[in-house]
Image (cartoon, rainbow, N blue to C red):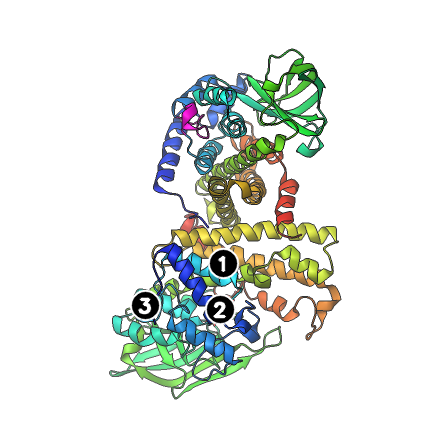
Amino acid sequence: MANLTRSEEEVMLADAARGFLDDAAPVSHLRKLRDAGKTHDPSLWKDMAAMGWSGILVPESAGGSDMGHAAAGILAAEMGKTLVCSPFLSSAVIAATALRQVTGERSAAALAGIAAGDVTYALAIDEGNKFAPDSTSLVAERLGNGFRLNGCKTFVVDGGFADHLLVLARTDEGLTLFDLPKDRDGISCNAQSMIDSRDAARIDFENVEATGDNVVGTVDDAMRVLKPALEAGQAALAAEMTGLAAGAFGMTVDYLKERKQFGTVIGNFQALQHRAAHLWCEIEVTASAVINAGRVLDNDPDNAAFAVSLAKARAMDTAKLAVIEGVQMHGGIGMTDAFDMGFYMKRARVAAEWLGDYGYHAEQVARSRGF
Amino acid sequence: MSSLSTDPDQFRAELRDWLEQNCPAEMRDASTAEDNICWGGRTWVFQSNAQRIWLERMAAKGLTVPTWPTAFGGAGLDRACEKIFQQEMGRINARPPLLSFGIWMLGPALLHFGTEQQKQHYLPPIARGELRWCQGYSEPGAGSDLASVQTRCDDKGDYWLVNGQKVWTSYADKADWIFALVRTDRDAKKHLGISFVLIDMASAGVTTRPIKLISGVSPFCETFFDDVKFPKDQVVGTVNRGWDVAKYLLTHEREMISAGGQGLGGGRALGAVLAEQSGGLTDATLRAAALKSEVDALAIGLTLERYKDQAEGGEGVGDASAMLKYVGTELNKQRHELMMSASGSDALQWDGKSGADPADWLRTKANSIEGGTSEVMLGIISRRVLGLGA
Ligand SMILES: Cc1cc2nc3c(=O)[nH]c(=O)nc-3n(C[C@H](O)[C@H](O)[C@H](O)COP(=O)(O)OP(=O)(O)OC[C@H]3O[C@@H](n4cnc5c(N)ncnc54)[C@H](O)[C@@H]3O)c2cc1C
């Protein structure tokens, strides 16, 4: 088993990320975007690209920094602490991992676009209200040498602003992944107003034409490229959620040391101390599962499903507890829009559903543990 | 006997080979059922010849205490080799050759606080399983509030004289020696008048009286000291500063207790254990609870590993031991509840041969009490990690 502590370089990466984000994207940044009716800040993404974040999983040959999944998790966790709104997961983690599974000029060019921060991607996978890639029904029927896509995708995270879509479609003998520019004829995008103030869209496909060039990997074999991409995304999302939990927890502990009632700070009440201590334990335990997922993805990617699902399941549980306790221990102020805790609660709920909920991931763990 | 290589890959190969040749077949069943444990000690009666051989061979290699320095009976393994050792033992499902309070608790404390002479005198017999130790911390009036121990220990010039009572002393009636907290200064503040002392249980004036547990067995005792004399060099650390030794030892004890839930069913998945006990895991409520428990158990296991990775040179995990103990023991209790539930009425007989063992289930209820209660663990985390309260 790999070492589960952070290396010196990893600690430096986290510190550097924190330094940048505290300045460029504190929670007030998300609040400003929301109040302005925006879900994306292109200049922030440009800055991240300049630091190599957009290319963190892109091979160096395509202009990336190729630092691996553990490093991507460190960035995601730091972003989670202040609820940073960026295309990092959709483009830099999920799309980059899918595209690098294929060789050739097209994917190299696409990866270069991601690494440079010029092109953003969204994964169009869900069709109902739960993550269930196996029951995809959007069809891509054969049309001469190409395909014609018809159907609808829901909860396409970052779908509103993304330039490209990775679309999972049913073909004759299985599932196929397509890479389509969002302005392709027949694609219509309806941005949704999401509780976490971030981007997600419902996207309709009406007689959308695609060529063999748009296929990522092999026809009828989407999972070869998609499975690693999903695992990378799930692990990074779990990391984001532990960051989120730590962020909410930090605010809560600060408040326990500051707020006075009954003539003393509320942190002197044992009932609250024990709840805070319990929450800290949960955060620590989850952090181990998240670090482990990054390590396994880097060292043994073919066998990472179990470690990734363990991390995502734990992360949901912990983030949920952190935001529920966060609101409760703040009392009335925790319920106000002017206070940030609500942002944490809403993001935790969205992140819990994205890329598989607790039941989905716990079930994956259970299967590999002989249930 | 030749020592093993320090190069990880070579170490693995040599160790695998050695284990293959030296671990008796009967010992390839990592059951930690009380009947199978080897505790060692002056009066120890081996349950089988294989148990004796296994202990002797492992001790000769330093592998009863793999991370201790070779000078004191260990194998001097670093963290990387220790992990390999665990993996290779697990690979053949080998039983630990020796378990003891000396290994878990006193050894680490002596390595940290003992004089060179104390280390040389006390550690090798622990490693070889020749002396069995018990822990004399708790008293009738000093449980969670351990620093209020009252057992009196007076300096009589060329010896110490002890009078008082300990309680809940696990295996006191079977142990050869006791490490105990005693009050050596009655006027100082409570934390500053305690000393950590080592006493031979065969000394005149030491008596024990077993107490029966809800699980039906009597593993622990009341321990009485009536004018017990012991030599001056049997204090560990500084006189009146025994609380530092006591606390350090507790972090090792808690780390050890926290791992209890991990070995369940010989490290098998809970789902498999439950399926076996219930004849297929068909009850949806039970399955859902088991699923969550399994997710938590795996993450807790990784956390234990992560903190050990972090700990410097065998120094233990420090305050984090409170967290590990809290999550590990609460988990273990819950897992045994699930096993009882899966087994239904099969597990309701004392001598039931199928399903969960009710004695084990009852015993786990002590996990969140012994070594400091869950509430005390949460208190330690609040104060020392989160900085809450005074
Ligand atoms: C099976 C078993 C084996 C043991 N073996 C040994 C041994 O070998 N050697 C030894 O020395 N001791 C041993 N013990 C004793 C054990 O360490 C004590 O039982 C334990 O420290 C709790 O002390 P107590 O029993 O006096 O409970 P108390 O301290 O009286 O606690 C009663 C309840 O009050 C709660 N409580 C106490 N203080 C606080 C607080 N400040 N805040 C919130 N809640 C609080 C506790 O959590 C608990 O729920 C053993 C105990 C058991 C059950």
Badge 1 is on which residue? B325
The chain under label 1 reads B
| Image quadrant in which you'd find residue A309 | top right
**Callout 3–callout 1 Cβ contact below 8 Å:** no
Q: Residue at x 72, y 55 (%)?
A: B281
Q: Residue at x 47, y 23 (%)?
A: A29
Residue type at the position of mark 2 = Pro
Q: Is residue B38 above or below residue B19?
A: below
Q: Secondary structure at mark 2?
A: loop
Where is residue B317 drawn, in percent x and y? 40, 56
Residue type at the position of mark 3 = Thr
Q: Is residue A322 above or below residue B98?
A: above
Viewer-proximal residue, A324 or A10? A10
The chain under label 2 reads B
In the displayed structure, does residue B290 sit left or right of residue B219?
Answer: right
Badge 2 is on which residue? B96
Disc 3 versus disc 1: nearer the observer: 3
Is residue A241 within the magenta segment? Answer: no
In the displayed structure, does residue B281 sit left or right of residue A3?
Answer: right
Q: Secondary structure at mark 3?
A: helix
The chain under label 3 reads B
Q: Earlier in the sequence, mark 2 or mark 3?
A: 3
